[in-house]
Image (cartoon, grey):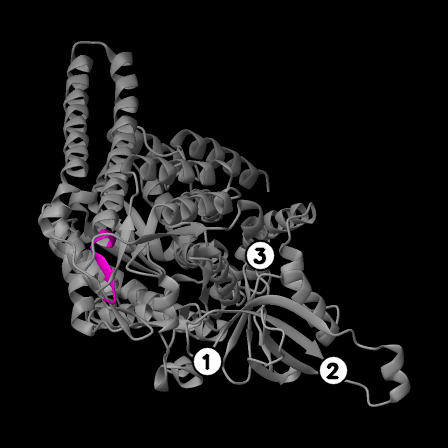
Amino acid sequence: MPAGGRIEQFTFAGSAREYFGIWIVNVLLTIVTLGIYSAWAKVRRMRYFYGSTRLAGSSFDYHARPVKILIGRIIVVTAIVIYNVLANLAPLAGLAVSLVLLPVVPWLLQRGLRFNARVTSFRNVRFDFAGGYWGAARAFVLGPVIAVLSLGILAPVTSRWLWRYVVGNLRYGGRGVACEPSVRALYRQWWLPALLVVCGLVLVAGGVVALKASSLLQAMGYDDLRRVLSVIIPIGIVAYLVLFYGTAGLVYHAGVRNVALGATVLDGQHRFRSTLSRGRYAFIAITNLLATVFSLGLARPWAAVRMARYNAAATALVVAGSLDDYLSGIVVSGSAVGAEFMDVEGFDFAL
Amino acid sequence: MWKASTLPSDAATEAEQPFACDGTWHPPGGSRAVPARLVADRGRVEIVPADVAAEVALATGLETEVEVSARVGSIPRRVVLPDGSVFVSHDNDALDRWLQRRHGAGYGFVAALERFHPRLLVVVAMIVALCFATYRYALPVMVEVAVAVTPPVAPQMMGRSVLATLDHSLLAPSALGEGVQDSLKRQFRDLADLSPRKAEGFTLHLRRGGRIGANAFALPDGAIILTDELVELAQSEDEILGVLAHEIGHVEHEHSLRRLYLAAGLSGLIMLAGGDIGAAVEDLLMQGSLLVTLSYSRDHEHEADRYSAALMARAGRDPLALGRLFARLEEELGAGGGGLLSTHPATGERIDRLRREAESQLRD
């Protein structure tokens, strides 16, 4: 694979003004139609974000039909209702049902990924997803369990499973995508967030010790001081937990994305590049959350566009030769075109 | 649907201007991009290369066979031709003029509403009003309807399974003497007979509380559990009966079912209105809805207290005894209740309210 090549930058052309209108009308019509419009709302939202994401002058497109999304949602909501009724009437039966349903989870996720890939196109050619059941089970069920049981120490290994499954199984016009991040490179992104978590734990331990000390204060007669401390310290602990764990998660996510996308190659010749600054990414995510909460949700469109713009600006495709020549050579025929393909796309089981 | 008129005179007066807009054309199933121009004239659509003077059409079709994607903001539009080839254009306004000519002025209503305009303030106001009205009026009605249509077998199953779980995990058989147990059950029956469900609607279960200590609670099927520790803490029969009357109130008002439906309704509403709000904010909202159910729970306690005072007065017993028990409970266990984060209201407030309720009962 050639080291050099033309750099085609991803850009996001959407604006907060424009998305605000789409977003707020989506919310209104969803409420007025008792949720039915939510499927149409999702299609408009996805089309806006895909259509505003550009590479080499062309936009992505989202083709899902709202009815398919609506059917998927009705199935999911019905299942949730039945499960909750059962769990309340007969808790043991509820537990049994959830054990029976656990093996279905990877299948649902795999179908969801395939649906999303198949309704996505770039320059009139569709994506596809070739991942199977066991890959999904490893990436989405086994991976999180191992990451938690190892206290996060094996997280880079499970992140590698996840990215290899989700990105490495994508197909564009029948051409494969390879995603092979090295575990060593992932661990290089791991130690900083791990350090943050350890710092958080040390501070929490300090808070607990201070709480114990404050009951000593009470024994010595400083009752008011103890009362003040016993309020401040727990609040401090919670704030630190949120801040440290939240930030650590964001820093880790950005680092893993850089490594994983950097190790992603389209059709064995075009390499992706991701250059997120981990600090800037965490800063944007945290300030987005604060702005959304303190504006009672109204700043959400601005926040979503801001994040999409940053993500796109930090993503590029390093093309061997000319992208236009390469794309012009892609012609898909047979079952991957047209109506039949749309009919096997299945349903979107996401809520 | 728009249709070309066949009358020559009409054709002359509303002569359709040929429509044209610029864009890019992709062949069927192909990623090749050709700068092109869409021309629509007299019901026929033609895609011609932009830079070639010779009119060799890349694709053609009837206006009625052509599919145009809906407008969303200013993202490019997709025009799908009968042969599967696609014409993409950024000229949203021109395409809208053409489509409105075909489908009438109502075309693109949603996209027009979405445009950034002071009118969106009205949309925001409507959403706020709808959310408030749903929470304030529709949600309580939905809870009432759900309670009304719940078949009686559901609370029975819930009560039975909860009692079985509690007996397995927390509770032990009562250690009270048989004489005490019988007398408690007899007095409970007499008291319950004064409520609309009568004594048959309730069962008193006496248990040793162990870890949960002095406590009493009601299950939706009318099972009322009273712990030995509470009996030991009470200094008079009226105090115990006041607690039992409070639990009878919970059953009569169907508070467990109501709380269950309220929690379900709230999370349903959040999922429904949520849309694209971000995972973190959705989590925050779900936690916030817990605060709301807690505030309902405190209202339920007040309601049950009122019920207790009324029932005790009707039974010719002391409605204030319950308040004395609350005060003692607070002394034993430390201050409890009242804040935003508690299921029960503050004890002092409950005692005050009980006193007022008892006074109004005595007046009547």
Cα gap from disc 1 to disc 3, whole angstroms:
25 Å
Q: Which residue is drawn at 56% across and 49% down?
A: A20
Decide which of B90, B186 is in the foreground and name it. B90
Q: Name the residue type under label 1.
A: Pro
Nearer to us: label 1 or label 3: 1
Query: Which circle's residue, 1 or 3, is located before the other in the chain?
Result: 1
Q: Which residue is drawn at 36% across and 81% down?
A: A336
Q: What element carries label 3?
A: loop
The crowd level at tag 1 (other Cα within 10 Å; few <14, some 14-19, many 20+) is many
Q: Name the residue type under label 2.
A: Arg
Task: Return the x and y of residue B328 as percentages of the image width and height.
Answer: 30, 31
Q: What stretch is highlighted in magenta?
A: A261-267
Tell me the residue that label 2 is attached to: B42
Q: In which quarter of the image is residue A117?
A: bottom left
Tell me the residue that label 3 is attached to: B74
Q: Quadrant of the C terminus of chain A?
A: bottom left
Q: Name the residue type under label 3.
A: Ser
Q: Is mark 2 on a helix, strand or loop?
A: loop
Q: Give the numbered dot on residue A28.
A: none
Task: Return the x and y of residue A283 as percentages of the image width and height.
Answer: 35, 35
